[in-house]
Image (spheres, rainbow, N blue to C red):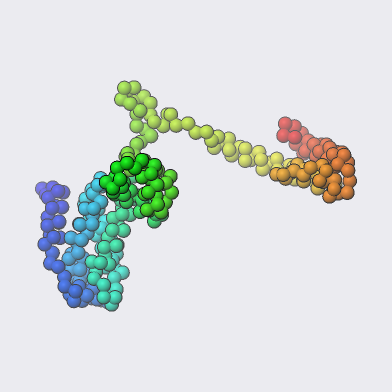
Amino acid sequence: MTSPMNARRRFVKAAMEAPYLGREEEHDLAVRWRDGRDEAALHRLTAAHMRLVIALAARFKHFGLPASDLIQEGHVGLLEAAARFEPAREVRFSTYATWWIRAAIQDYVLRNWSIVRGGTSSSQKALFFNLRRLRAKLARGTSDLTETEMFTEIANAVGVSRADVEAMNARLSAPDTSLNAPLSEADGGGSDRQDFLVADAPLQDEMVGEQIDGERRTIWLRGALKVLSERELRIVRERRLEDDGATLEALGEKLGISKERVRQIENRALEKLKVALLRQQPDHAAFV
């Protein structure tokens, strides 16, 4: 029975032994595939460039993903390049296909390196794939850089914030850890990491209950406001229902009355509101 390792070696050997294509032959194969959907031409075109896929996939082996999967994803990118290639532009297929192969492999790495999705923007993607290289380059060039200075240099080079660099560095420094993993083997697996995660937010049933109560109180208040006169309603709105409540003096100037008169009208309006609210909901005096 053939082992996966031997099968992969044979595949790589076959890819490396595939004949190179001249410019004219490559152009002819690309035209035959584009215009006539000649699958034999597509096979020859892609088979001749599988060594390119293997070479590009090898650059991502340090992410710890299976080499066969990287090559497979690169082959998907190669097929995508073949589907989009325009022979009339007089560009070599390998030059055009390199971008698509690399993009397919990078997308696979981003989707499978961690269960936490990252690198969704172009700048974050560039940071993910270049952080280690840039750190090593800066370390070789200037040995006396502090970590903060190094992160700042990388942030400027990639075009992200220093906080993004620090967060990505933390992600790349350690693998994912399950919340169900025990804190230590000493306690016999009795305590999981999730047991020590404290959520400050209220429970969902509490948030839903508060939302429902708030909607009810709003409906009651709107009904009670109907008992006020136009002037009483204006005073209550500007004094009690706005974020920046108006002063008695400012309201008095607007209405052409004294601030003491505004206070009296406000107190009378609040009493009327209380009576109206209790009339609607006599069992909810605590809300009034």
Residue 30 location, quadrant: bottom left
Seen at 76% across and 33% down, the residue is 282
Q: Residue at x 58, y 35 (%)?
A: 206
Query: In the picture provided, is 276 more to the left or to the right than 64?
Result: right
Q: Can the viewer see residue 135 in this picture?
A: yes
- The quadrant of the picture occupied by the C terminus is top right
Q: Which of 200 and 204 is in front in this view?
A: 200
User: Looking at the image, how many numbered discs can be counted on the residues?
Assistant: 0
Is there any visible trace of residue 269 in the rendered image? no
Residue closer to the observer: 185 or 239: 239
Q: Judge left or right: residue 222 versus residue 85.
A: right
Query: Where's residue 29, x and y in %?
Result: 21, 73
Vertical side of 193 occupied by 161: above or below: below
Residue 159, percent across and down? 41, 54
Q: Where is residue 28, by image quadrant?
A: bottom left
Q: In this rendering, is residue 148 above or below 198?
A: below
Question: Which residue lies at the image location 81% right of the left edge and 46% below the top edge?
Answer: 250
